Image (cartoon, rainbow, N blue to C red):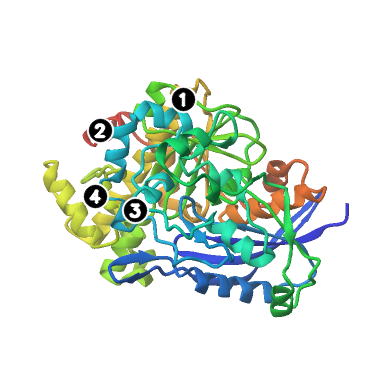
């Protein structure tokens, strides 16, 4: 078929982009139309997303496109906006790192039981999950519709409200067994049933552009907005260039989402205790994974040092720093909020009887080795709990640029690591649109044939990694 162009709106936790992908039977190219920062705003003590600012940037990006077949929108998970009966947004969406959910998860677990919660949603217990955000305070009486962030932007583009399934499955209010909202569970929680909109699947056409949007962007009103894997990890996993099903993946950015792809959820008690989540993927698959804190630890360290421009030199120095001098558990909740990350790393090391890192290069080495151990633990546990063997690990997203992190992940896992594509989320977004329009029948093969990939082979002493994992409880 004749190649077509698709606009992928991809909003990450620290930046956003509008990319144009050209997709054909033997073609997959990506062009950046617009890139912009995503800066949360603290107002009156609450940390918000500047969602109107993000939407304005999306419109700017769409203005820089032409000849596109459709538009798809993805973003991070769990956060949402509430609309009133007139379709107006009630307040700015709150950031998942805000402290309003402090203590809420523990109370809900105590009231309902961890087993009951896991049996419905199959989610890792994280304090910012949508269920706990909604239960952190009364839902406004005037709220009529809850829209996850990408669904909110799609609503503003088209006027059509709905909930795409890959993101709905991150709420804790979606029944991973039945593939529908957990209505009886929602009622039991005392949440208003009516605010949860109809579900969509990736590939469904949401609607066409509103006249005002068409006028503002210069695109035809007939341009469709197509549902994609609107949870950015779902889109990223679709772009994993795997050759078979015996692969693990790490979608590595602000967060590292590390796990495997399955046909059905794993809802065992052992899976719950191990902290695994079952989220819906494109094509009805299950993303069986663990959330690892990710490059957030490095990003916040650089911010504390005001040293973003020094990252290349810091990485070079970290490569020469002594191995395993200090390690942290990247899943420790002390690292979740914004703030002075190097100070928290120091406090963790002192609390666990380790000598803290003595310089910036040692902090970076500590972060990257700790992340590699987090990746190793997640991949190994996922394989053990699911019975699915893993022969190769794919690192996609921004972390695929990091040669040191990819090499350390290969060393820690004792498996080859295939790094790339870097823009996996935007590629997966575009591929879902292309499939809906009769293209990209074999999306992973197309990615493998057209994108730059780097292979890292494991090296070093596996026993040393075993000892390191034991030090931070990740063995």
Q: Determine whether the residue tagged by mark 4 lies in a helix, strand or loop.
A: helix
Residue 334: assigned label: 4
Q: Determine whether the residue tagged by mark 2 lies in a helix, strand or loop.
A: loop
Mark 4 and mark 1: Cα distance apart in space: 27 Å
| Earlier residue among tags 4 and 1 | 1
| Camera-side mark, 2 or 3 | 3
Mark 2 and mark 4: Cα distance apart in space: 16 Å
Could you tell me if residue 459 is visible in this image?
no
| Image marks 1 and 2: residues in contact by CB distance under 8 Å | no
Residue 137: assigned label: 3
Residue 88 at x, y percent in the picture: 55, 68
| Earlier residue among tags 2 and 4 | 4
Could you tell me if residue 221 is visible in this image?
yes
Please give left or right for residue 232 compared with residue 438 in the image: left
Mark 1 and mark 2: Cα distance apart in space: 23 Å
| Earlier residue among tags 1 and 2 | 1
Which quadrant would residue 209 be assigned to in this image?
bottom right
């Amino acid at each position: 078929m004749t190649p077509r162009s698709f606009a992928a709106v991809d909003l990450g936790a620290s930046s956003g982009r509008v990319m144009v992908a050209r997709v054909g039977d033997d073609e997959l190219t990506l062009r950046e139309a617009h890139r912009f920062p995503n800066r949360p705003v603290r107002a009156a003590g609450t940390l918000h997303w500047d969602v109107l600012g993000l939407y304005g940037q999306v419109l700017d990006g769409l203005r820089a496109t032409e000849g596109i077949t459709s538009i798809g929108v993805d973003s991070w998970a769990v956060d949402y906006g509430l609309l009133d009966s007139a379709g107006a947004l009630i307040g700015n969406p709150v950031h998942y790192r805000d402290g309003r959910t402090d203590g809420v998860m523990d109370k809900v677990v105590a009231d309902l039981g961890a087993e009951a919660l896991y049996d419905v949603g199959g989610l890792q217990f994280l304090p910012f999950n949508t269920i706990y955000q909604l239960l952190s305070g009364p839902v406004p009486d005037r709220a009529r519709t809850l829209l996850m962030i990408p669904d909110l932007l799609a609503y503003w583009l088209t006027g059509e409200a709905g909930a795409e399934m890959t993101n709905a499955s991150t709420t804790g209010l979606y029944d991973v067994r039945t593939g529908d909202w957990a209505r009886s569970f929602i009622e039991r929680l005392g949440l208003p049933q009516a605010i949860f909109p109809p579900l969509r699947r990736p590939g469904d056409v949401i609607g066409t552009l509103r006249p005002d949007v068409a006028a503002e962007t210069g695109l035809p009103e007939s341009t469709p907005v197509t549902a994609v894997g609107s949870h950015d990890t779902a889109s990223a996993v679709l772009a994993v260039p795997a050759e078979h099903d015996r692969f693990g993946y790490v979608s590595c950015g602000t967060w590292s989402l590390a796990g495997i792809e399955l046909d059905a959820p794993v809802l065992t008690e052992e899976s719950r205790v191990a902290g695994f989540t079952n989220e819906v993927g494109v094509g009805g698959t299950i993303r069986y994974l663990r959330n690892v804190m990710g490059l957030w630890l490095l990003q916040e360290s650089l911010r504390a040092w005001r040293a973003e421009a020094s990252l290349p030199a810091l990485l070079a120095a970290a490569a020469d720093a002594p191995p395993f001098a200090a390690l942290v558990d990247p899943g420790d909740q002390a690292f979740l909020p914004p703030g002075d990350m190097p100070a928290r790393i120091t406090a963790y090391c002192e609390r666990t009887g380790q000598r803290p890192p003595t310089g910036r290069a040692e902090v970076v080495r500590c972060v990257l080795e700790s992340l590699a151990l987090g990746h190793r633990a997640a991949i190994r546990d996922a394989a053990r709990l699911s019975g699915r063997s893993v022969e190769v690990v794919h690192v996609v997203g921004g972390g695929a640029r990091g040669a040191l992190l990819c090499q350390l992940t290969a060393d820690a896992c004792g498996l080859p690591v295939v790094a790339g594509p870097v823009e996996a989320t935007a590629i997966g977004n575009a591929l879902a649109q292309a499939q809906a329009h009769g293209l990209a029948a074999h999306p992973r093969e197309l990615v493998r044939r057209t994108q730059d990939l780097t292979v890292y082979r494991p090296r070093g002493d596996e026993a040393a990694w075993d000892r390191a994992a034991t030090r931070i409880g990740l063995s």
